[in-house]
């Protein structure tokens, strides 16, 4: 079994955001507007510790975001393919219809 695999920044964000109950609804709304809006929303969470207009101060939220930053690695959010993250957020919803 291969143990040296490290997910890409796109895989990290595409796995985290759609399944995190704290932020998936707002992220889906941003994704529905477009990739730029989604990118701004996630950057707000990760770098500015804010959920739209609300600052994030809960220790659990901050630890969760810290773990995501660690998983992003060297490329960080700049290496994320936002179209793929958008698909991860929106395609599951369209397939349910």
Image: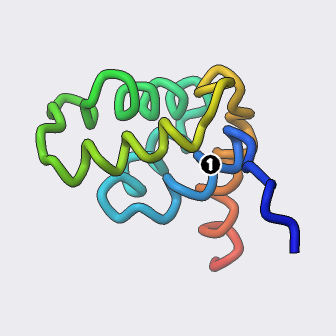
- Height in image: 2 above or below 97? above
Residue lying at 80% horizontally and 55% vertically, measured from the top left: 4
* Residue matched to label 1: 12
Most foreground residue, 58 or 5: 5
Give the side of residue 67 with respect to residue 80, left or right. Answer: left
Numbered label tally: 1
Most foreground residue, 37 or 18: 18
- Height in image: 95 above or below 66? below
Image coords of residue 18 (percent x, y): 52, 59
Most foreground residue, 25 or 63: 63
Image coords of residue 32 (percent x, y): 55, 44
Quarter-of-image position of residue 88: bottom right
Give the side of residue 75 with respect to residue 1, left or right. Answer: left
* SS at mark 1 in the image: helix
Most foreground residue, 18 or 46: 46
Which quadrant: the N terminus? bottom right
- Height in image: 67 above or below 33? below
The furthest residue to the right = 1
- Height in image: 72 above or below 64? above
Residue lying at 30% horizontally and 22% vertically, measured from the top left: 48
Colour approach in the figure: rainbow
Image coords of residue 38 (percent x, y): 52, 34
Give the side of residue 97 with respect to residue 21, left or right. Answer: right
Give the side of residue 96 with respect to residue 49, left or right. Answer: right
The furthest residue to the bottom = 96
Residue lying at 59% horizontally and 56% vertically, measured from the top left: 89
Which quadrant: the C terminus? bottom right
Image coords of residue 12 (percent x, y): 62, 48
Q: Residues within 10 Å of mark 1 (few under 14, many from 20)?
A: many
């Amino acid at each position: 079994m291969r143990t040296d695999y490290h997910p890409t920044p796109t895989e990290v964000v595409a796995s985290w955001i759609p399944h995190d109950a704290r932020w998936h609804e707002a992220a889906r709304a941003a994704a529905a507007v477009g990739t730029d809006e989604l990118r701004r929303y996630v950057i707000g969470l990760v770098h500015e510790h804010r959920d739209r207009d609300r600052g994030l101060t809960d220790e659990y939220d901050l630890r969760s975001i810290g773990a995501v930053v660690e998983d992003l690695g060297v490329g960080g959010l700049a290496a994320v393919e936002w179209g793929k993250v958008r698909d991860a957020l929106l395609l599951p919803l369209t397939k349910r219809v």
